Image: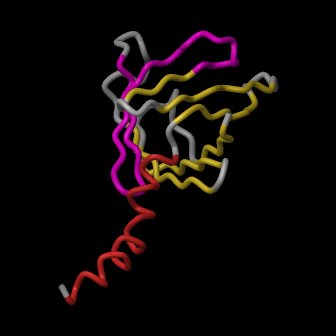
């Protein structure tokens, strides 16, 4: 029982790793510029069941369905629709969440349609 006093300390040390896994769940918005110079806002939703959706242009229509896995500070994304340019191509991104800001930095992604060096999103 001498070691019981260490349990709260161990929990406090490791709690951020367990809590971080849930920090990115929910809806996020990201703005960008099209090749034509038009500003567009997209909504990305991460669901607790490992699925995610993307709504290009925030028009309420889901344009991309995908699955993701989260391990440590990385998320791996795979589109589930066979019609998608990214179907069968696994994208890996290093992620951080700070308050209402979600940042994803490219690790590797063979899909040109999805790949970005850095994506910064705001909680919706």
Q: Residue 56: say if magenta.
A: yes
Point 36% across, 28% down: residue: 67
Q: Tell which residue pokes out farthest to the bottom in this image.
A: 2
Against 117, residue 90 (above or below) is: above
Q: Quadrant of residue 123?
A: top right
Q: Is residue 39 left or right of residue 51?
A: right
Residue 54: x %, y % from top left: 55, 23
Q: Is residue 107 left or right of residue 55?
A: left
On screen, 37 above or below 24? above
Q: Between 54 and 107, which is closer to the camera in this rendering?
A: 54
Q: Position of residue 102 (x, y in %)?
A: 60, 47
* Residue drawn at x 61%, y 43% as measured from the top left: 119
Q: How many marks?
A: 0
Q: Position of residue 27 (x, y in %)?
A: 59, 31
Q: Is residue 66 magenta?
A: yes
Q: Which residues are magenta?
A: 55-80
Screen quadrant of the C terminus: top right
**Residue at 39% in and 35% down:** 77
Depth check: give the residue in front, 7 or 108. 7
The scheme the figure's colours follow is secondary structure
When asked about the image quadrant of residue 34, the answer is top right
**Residue at far left of view:** 1
Q: Is residue 19 above or below residue 114?
A: below
The image quadrant that residue 29 belongs to is top right
**In the image, what residue occupies the spot 51% across and 48% down?**
23
Q: Position of residue 8 (x, y in %)?
A: 36, 76
Q: Quadrant of the N terminus?
A: bottom left
């Amino acid at each position: 029982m001498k070691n019981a006093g260490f349990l709260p300390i161990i929990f406090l040390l490791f709690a951020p790793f367990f809590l971080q896994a849930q920090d990115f769940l929910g809806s996020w918005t990201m703005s960008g510029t099209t090749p034509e110079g038009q500003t567009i806002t997209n909504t990305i939703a991460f669901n607790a069941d490992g699925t995610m959706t993307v709504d290009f242009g925030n028009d309420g229509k889901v344009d991309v369905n995908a699955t993701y896995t989260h391990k440590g500070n990385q998320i791996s994304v795979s589109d589930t629709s066979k019609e998608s340019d990214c179907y069968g191509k696994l994208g890996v991104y290093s992620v951080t969440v700070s308050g209402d800001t979600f940042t994803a930095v490219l690790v590797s992604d063979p899909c040109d349609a999805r790949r970005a060096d850095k994506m910064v999103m705001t909680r919706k």
